[in-house]
């Protein structure tokens, strides 16, 4: 399938640089089965779902995974994207041509790492020196890994430490937030429970590869990045029971959706899962686990816009995005959201 089918023009002023405040005051574009688009607000969500439905959240926690350092006289930037072992991470490097296997990179604040070989995704293995946990080193020397379309327009600051973290964040390991869940607050969660809507959590550690552009001209030639996820057995049992009772599973974010689909067999049964996934969802894919998706607005020609096009239809999503742009919706990680119910 041609990648240019998923292109669209987005005015720069539609890109959000800060989240809405309060979080649940962001706009929500309701895209129901009948195709009539309705402009709502995130705090309207309980009225748009049914008792017995289940919202599925990702509880990954974003770590301060961006580092700036020196290899000799060369300035090196590193974005960690996947843990390999207790002290080793795969990382994408800026100015990577200046780094060779065995070089030491000094990231300041007493944090150093030895570069290893390059991996199949174009990154480099970094082995952190010393005895302190890598998470402690990152808290000292790292900064929050804002997406390039935000970081290129303003510097990361202290506010991003809280803004770029969901209320569900518990499991350290993500280098990008599951941004659809950024809109949720304790008050909204109370209203959701009051409406008889259940909630569950799973874990998918979002990698920096989520921001990599699709460089191929055809989707068949794109290599999807790997991300590690886990669904506990009791969580899978509750999700299967809810669906058997007539409830709909609504993934909050494409990360939750991708993990649910990775863990579900042809029979539609969700199974426990603890592994990497490279699932790449494009139009023509048959969904097995989810009945809807709450998600922010995505980059043109991205794997995530391909995913929502697979769920709702490419022409339909192009129309949805045209409406969102015309109505001034805020796009991307800190932007507004949509509720897609195929």
Image (cartoon, helix red, strand yellow):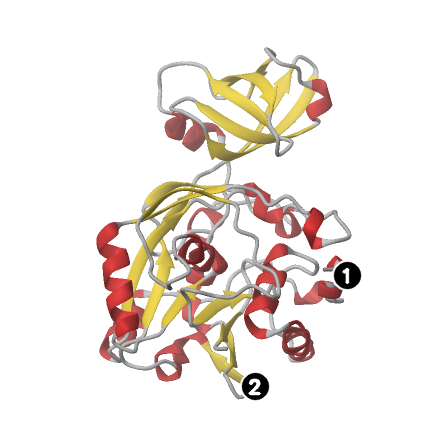
Q: CA distance from mark 1 to mark 2?
A: 24 Å
> In the rendered image, which residue does mark 2 sit on?
35
**Of label 1 and label 2, which has the lower sequence position?**
1
Residue 335 at x, y percent in the picture = 55, 64
Q: Nearer the viewer, residue 75 or 306?
A: 306
Quarter of the image where one finds residue 189: bottom left
Residue at the spot 62% in from the left edge and 14% down from the top edge: 101
In the displayed structure, would residue 16 be above or below residue 232?
below
Secondary structure under the numbered disc 1 in the rendered image:
helix
Relative to 317, 111 lies left or right? left
Residue 4 - label: 1
In the displayed structure, would residue 115 be above or below residue 243?
above
Q: Nearer the viewer, residue 92 or 279?
A: 279
Mark 1: give few (<14), some (14-19) or many (20+) Cα within 10 Å.
few
Residue at the spot 48% in from the left edge and 77% down from the top edge: 341
Residue 173 - label: none
Residue 128 at x, y percent in the picture = 46, 19
Mark 2: give few (<14), some (14-19) or many (20+) Cα within 10 Å.
some
Residue at the spot 65% in from the left edge and 62% down from the top edge: 15
Q: Residue furthest front?
A: 267
Secondary structure under the numbered disc 2 in the rendered image:
loop
One can see residue 215 in this view: yes
């Amino acid at each position: 399938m041609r990648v240019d089918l998923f292109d669209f023009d987005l005015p720069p002023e539609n890109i959000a640089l800060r989240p809405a405040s309060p979080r649940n005051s962001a706009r929500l574009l309701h895209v129901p089965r009948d195709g009539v688009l309705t402009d709502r607000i995130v705090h309207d969500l309980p009225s748009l779902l049914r008792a017995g439905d289940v919202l599925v959240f990702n509880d990954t926690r974003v770590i301060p995974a961006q580092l700036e350092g020196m290899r000799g006289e060369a300035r090196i930037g590193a974005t960690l994207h996947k843990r390999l072992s207790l002290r080793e991470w795969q990382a994408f490097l800026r100015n990577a041509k200046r780094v060779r296997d065995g070089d030491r990179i000094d990231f300041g604040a007493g944090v150093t790492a030895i570069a290893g070989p390059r991996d199949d995704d174009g990154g480099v293995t970094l082995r952190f020196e010393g005895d302190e946990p890598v998470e402690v080193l990152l808290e000292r020397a790292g900064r929050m890994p804002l997406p390039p379309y935000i970081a290129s327009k303003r510097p990361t600051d202290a506010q991003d430490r809280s803004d770029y973290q969901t209320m569900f964040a518990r499991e350290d390991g993500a280098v990008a937030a599951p941004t659809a869940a950024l809109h949720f607050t304790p008050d909204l969660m109370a209203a959701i429970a009051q409406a008889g809507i259940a909630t569950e959590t799973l874990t998918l550690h979002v990698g920096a590869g989520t921001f990599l552009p699709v460089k191929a001209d055809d989707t068949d030639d794109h290599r999807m990045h790997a991300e590690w996820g886990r669904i506990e057995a009791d969580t899978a049992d509750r999700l299967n029971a809810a669906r058997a009772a007539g409830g709909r599973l609504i993934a909050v974010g494409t990360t939750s959706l991708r993990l649910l689909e990775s863990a579900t067999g042809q029979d539609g049964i969700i199974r426990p899962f603890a592994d990497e996934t490279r699932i790449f969802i494009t139009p023509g894919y048959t969904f097995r686990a989810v009945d809807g998706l709450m998600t922010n607005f995505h980059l043109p020609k991205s794997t995530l816009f391909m995913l929502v096009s697979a769920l709702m239809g490419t022409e339909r999503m192009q129309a949805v995005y045209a409406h969102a742009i015309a109505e001034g919706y805020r796009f991307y990680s800190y932007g507004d959201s949509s509720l897609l119910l195929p």
